[in-house]
Amino acid sequence: MSHPNNFSLLLSITTALILLIIQALHPVKANYNIMSYGAKSDGQTDSSGPLSSAWQAACTSTGSSTIYIPSGTFMLKPITLNGPCKSNKIIIQIDGTLVAPSSYSTAVQQWIMFKQVDGVSIYGGTINGQGQTLWSCKSSSNGCPAGATSLIFSNSKNIMISGLTSINSELYHIAINGCEGVQVQGVKISAPGNSPNTDGIHVQMSTNVTITGTGIKTGDDCVSIGPGTTDLWIERVTCGPGHGISIGSLGKDKEEKGVQNVIVKNTVFTGSQNGLRIKTWGRPSDGFVKGVVFEHALMQNVQNPIIIDQNYCPHNDGCPDQNSGVKISGVTYNDIQGSSATQVAMNFDCSPSNPCSGIVLEDIKLTYGDKLAESSCKNVDGTASGFVVPPSCL
């Protein structure tokens, strides 16, 4: 017969083991409210220190954790939140508004930056880059800094940005650089149509990125797709004002990664400068674009609904009288409809030394007021099928 003390000891050990197993299977979620670290919701007191402290606590936690930014307005000076972290599930729940300093800096290139993180999710909230002062500078002089990107993820993976609103960024609203596995969903982006260089979402050197259910009104590309982007899915995105969804500009550098496997579907462009654009510098490069599908797009008074421009050479600096080395192939346009604000609704201006090939047009219907819309082709080869208006020049 067992001694009672032995039975009690055995029971205690068993209970402790059960608790350890429960904790392992269902780890306690830690919550870090930035107000607990001294943040003030007055819109003036710098909250970058409290946010950094909350981040350090979450980053060193072994289980899942939530950083909470409650309702109110929190001023935030430029901040970098570094990984790698022990936790691979950190949620940042924003119920309030983060505002950048009202005056721009000559040295800062990013406002909120996540670097080398895994499993970070941002839900809700508003970030306000307060870019108006810098825009005014750029409109009146040439000695202004480039500005800061509002939110950037660099060299990170398994990222979610959901339900966030970004307004009035100095430079880009959101940038995804060197990342793998990023979901952007239900995001709203807003800046005036004349705000310079305020790209909505910029993706480069990244793979497996999806952008869905997002509305973008801004002063530059709604989505810009840079070198080294592969396996990008864009769906249910509205654009305008803005410069369209643009692959490029590419080919600025001689040695450059290509862009491939891009799908853009169910998009609406309203009053934008471009619709579906591919843009490359007119100078030597070993870059490429291949395996692109643009389908189910509605154009509403768009200046250049479909355009490939391989003669991009701003200020005629470093590229006049040269040909683009970027090879564009395997690009399909399917079910593109609506109205063009200019007579040339489809413009394929490809490289003389590297002509575009494998361009496919299927069921295109673009109108230009009560006049006949036109298409223009230079150095391009492809096919057209179904109902294609304006008449294809392929």
Image (cartoon, rainbow, N blue to C red):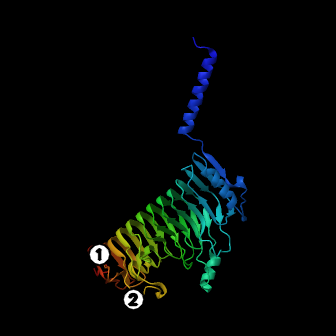
Q: Which of the 4 image quadrants contains residue 53?
A: bottom right
Pointer 1 residue? 357
**Dots 1 and 2: beta carbons under 8 Å?**
no
Looking at this view, is 136 or 345 the one in front? 136
Q: At 47% across and 86% down in the image, what residue appears? A: 317
| Residue at the front extreme of this rendering | 255
User: Of tags 1 and 2, which is closer to the observer?
Assistant: 2
Count residues near mark 1 (Cα–Cα under 10 Å), then give few for <14, some for 14-19, many for 20+.
some
Residue 274 in picture, x, y percent from top left: 44, 78
Element under disc 2:
loop
Q: At 47% across and 84% down in the image, what residue appears? A: 314
Rounded to the nearest whole Å, what is the CA distance between mark 1 and mark 2?
A: 22 Å
Q: At 50% across and 65% down in the image, what residue appears? A: 177
Q: Can you tell which mark lies on residue 3? A: none
Q: Is residue 42 above or below residue 34?
A: below
Which quadrant does the N terminus fall into?
top right
| Residue at the top extreme of this rendering | 1
Q: Which of the 4 image quadrants contains residue 348?
A: bottom left
Looking at this view, is 54 or 35 the one in front? 54
Task: Decide which of tag 1 and tag 2 comes sooner along the chain.
Answer: 2
Residue 90 in picture, x, y percent from top left: 57, 52
For the question of whether residue 70 can be seen, the reply is no
Residue 232 in picture, x, y percent from top left: 42, 63
Residue 359 in picture, x, y percent from top left: 30, 74
Q: At 42% across and 67% down in the image, what residue appears? A: 228
Looking at this view, is 173 or 3 the one in front? 3
Q: Amino acid at mark 2?
A: Asp
Which quadrant does the C terminus fall into?
bottom left
Element under disc 1:
strand
Pointer 2 residue? 321
Q: Is residue 218 above or below residue 68?
A: below
